Image (cartoon, coloured by chain):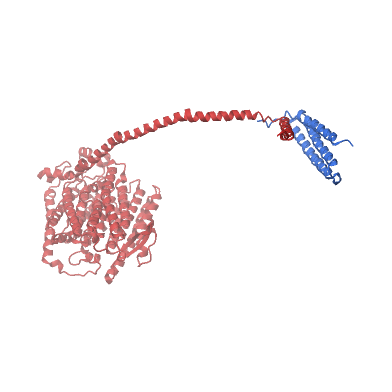
Amino acid sequence: MLAIAQPPPEGGLESGCLWLIPVLPLAAAGIGALLGRRQRRIAAGLAIGSMLLALILSCRAFVEVLHRVGQGGVARQSFNFHWLQFGDTWLTLGVVLDPLTAVMLVMVSFVGLLIFIYSVGYMAHDENFARFFCFLSLFASAMLGVVIANSLLLLFICWELVGLTSYLLIGFWYHKPSAAAAAKKAFITTRIGDLAFLLGMVWLYSRAGTLLFYDAGRGCLEWTGLPASTGIALLIFCGAVGKSGQLPLHAWLPDAMEGPTPVSALIHAATMVAAGVFLVARVYPLMGTTSLTVVTWVGALTALFAATVAVAQTDIKRILAYSTVSQLGFMMLGLGVGGVAVGMFHLLTHAFFKALLFLGAGSVIHGCHEEQDIRRMGGLRRWMPVTFATYVAGMLALSGFPLIASGFWSKDEILHAAHAWTVSSWPFYLGLMAAFLTAFYMTRQVVYVFFGKSRLARDPAIKAGQGGALPARPMVERAASEPHESPRVMLVPLMILAVFAVLLGFAGTPAWPWLRAFLEGRPASFAFGPLLEPEALWLMGLSSLVALGGIGLGYWFYGRRPPVRTDEVDALARVQPEVFTLLEKQYFVDEIYQWSVVSFHAWWARLCVQLDEWVWDFVVHLLAYAAVGLSWLNRFLDEYVVNGVFDQGCRGLTRGGAGLSHLQNGRVQRYLRVIALAAAALIWFLLWGWGAA
Amino acid sequence: MPPLPCYLLLAAMLFAIGLAAALTRRNAIIVLIGIELMLNAANLNFIAFWRYGPNPETLRGVLFVIFAIGVAAAEAAVGLALIIALHKHFKTTHVDQVDSMRG
């Protein structure tokens, strides 16, 4: 983050402010981390305030891009700065402001702000309130960093931070073993994709020599005819698959619902999972025909697969989670067949209505005293009118209710593009089926939750048998209190989101394709012509029919006679019990992974242990015994040879010293006597010895 | 005037007496006196060899002796001071009891 803290070099109006957008929530997270548990008001205020400032700055950036696009000028500005030096090459990071960044910035900070405000109400009773807001701010910072990054490396850093905060927030209630396991599952599963992403990044660097997206004609996205771009693009797409919960790495996302509901809304519906789609949109110039075909197929299959699973789930958040996986598949499909604008349009509308649905689900859960099983809800329409109304708005948007709902326009555009796709017509049909199922399961959910009579806590037997993931609460308390409407701090974000869930669709209708024009950097023009083309009309009619058919079938199955008892067999299960079980168990994907990947790893680990114990330990022990033997020999030599000689020498020296020390007796006269004798001897020698010689 | 060997014999006897005193007596003061005796025997030799030498008129031998007596006086002063310090420290002036330099 040090990198962003350095102000980028002089540029346009926004150069001074753009880097502030992720830094503000980061600072809030940093300060929030130092706060005590009791300083709830400061923690929430800091987080919300920083988010509000980020939103204001994002809107400024958005307005500036809008202005530039309106003038027909260059829509993209990038600000690069040096970060690290290796030898004589500099690693350069940067931020970029282009239409794609601008719309994402506004979306992330706006939805984020609403969810922050909602969390104040939702988490009011949690003792770790301050910590929650610290994590939320850190997440928002990382996500905004992903959005503004102009370097694949900076994007990757923020991407990993997003993964980290996702881990922290899913495991926020870490005392629940299921939440801790879900956090680990999410982290490890996305890591698989991120490894491929990292490899792709390294490959890209070795080919292009830069990781900057835009660098005055030298960035890796501005390079035409990059060698091996298909491989690079597919590896980067793997990262997006992990983050956006596409097949086959989708398994973490439904489990991630163990986190608090605002987290599910912010991370696992609106922003983080959209980061994968955003990544593909960002590196779109790298994507060749082959890569886009892969993206399309993965997206289409995921859309249908997750939609079928969502039909048979009973946990209110799990239904929405599979729905999210399915809608992310739609976005990938849109990117693959129609380009950036198609996918991004659905991303934006989806972010609003899915955040709305999740927050509505949170409100329901809150009102029903942490109940998450839709079989034990029912009739909540009477107690929670505002939640009901906003939830239905979100449901209609997600189902693609014709003309008034935003989901209709964005999904229609995807189907339109899929229909025009020349490679294969299958993705179009897969998408249609998924859209039909989406309408069906949303109707089922709304009927289960809001219609009929209340089934709340009628039957403690099921509760005891199945509510493993839910916190156990005394039955007395549950029975004593009726479901209640949520506080206003939670309802206001719901209402704002509901308005946007409806209105946002008009930013991309065929008559006024504002978003597409904006993303492509040209002014939009209003014309009824494209709307009234026969093909467009025919497709719109078809998708209306599909949505209405899904809603109608859902009503025919569930709405005519809403379930009365909690242990009642699902209406669909009565018709097709085998299929329903297959869907309820989520195609046994978790079990298949358990049997294949997990057990293979366990087997491999056991093999490694055996190898360790029998082969490596044996070698190590052999070496150890050899060393002990050698040192024993060494000791023997030391004691009997070296020591003996040395001791003997020492003893000789001691004895010699003792003998000589007798000479030094301290008696002066004896010394004198010796001197006299010596002198006498010398004289005798001088006088007669010499003469005789 | 008696011949030179008489003086030399006397000086040798003086030296022998001094040496015997320095070597055998335990009292440090007597040892010091013995050393003085040996010094004076040497002085006597100086005088005798000067007087019977080739040019006795130059006073060369006398000068030697005067210097030697001067040095001997200083040496006696130092020696006596040493003996006083010795006495203060060991409470004795017997040199055979002062053997703290024994190895």
Q: Quadrant of the C terminus of chain A?
A: top right
* Chain A, hue in figure: red
Judge by depth and name the residue closer to the eye, A70 or B55: B55
Q: Quadrant of residue A45?
A: bottom left
- Give the percent coordinates (x, y) of residue A99: 27, 64
Quarter of the picture containing the N terminus of chain A is bottom left
> In this view of the protein, which residue sits in the foreground, A598 or B102?
B102
Relative to B85, is A36 above or below?
below
On the image, which quarter does residue A676 sit in? top right
Locate residue A254, reporting x and y percent.
Answer: 23, 47
Q: Residue furthest right?
A: B1
> What is the residue that sits farthest to the bottom in this orientation?
A71
How many numbered tags mark residues here? 0
Task: Look at the image and tell me whether residue A500 can be seen.
Answer: no
- Pinpoint residue A207: horizontal percent, then vertical percent: 28, 58
Quick one: A87 or A445, which is closer to the camera?
A87
Where residue A195 sits in the image (x, y, percent)? 27, 50
- Residue A686 appears in view: yes
Residue at point 30% right, 64% down? A218
Q: Which chain is blue?
A: B
Q: Residue furthest left?
A: A575
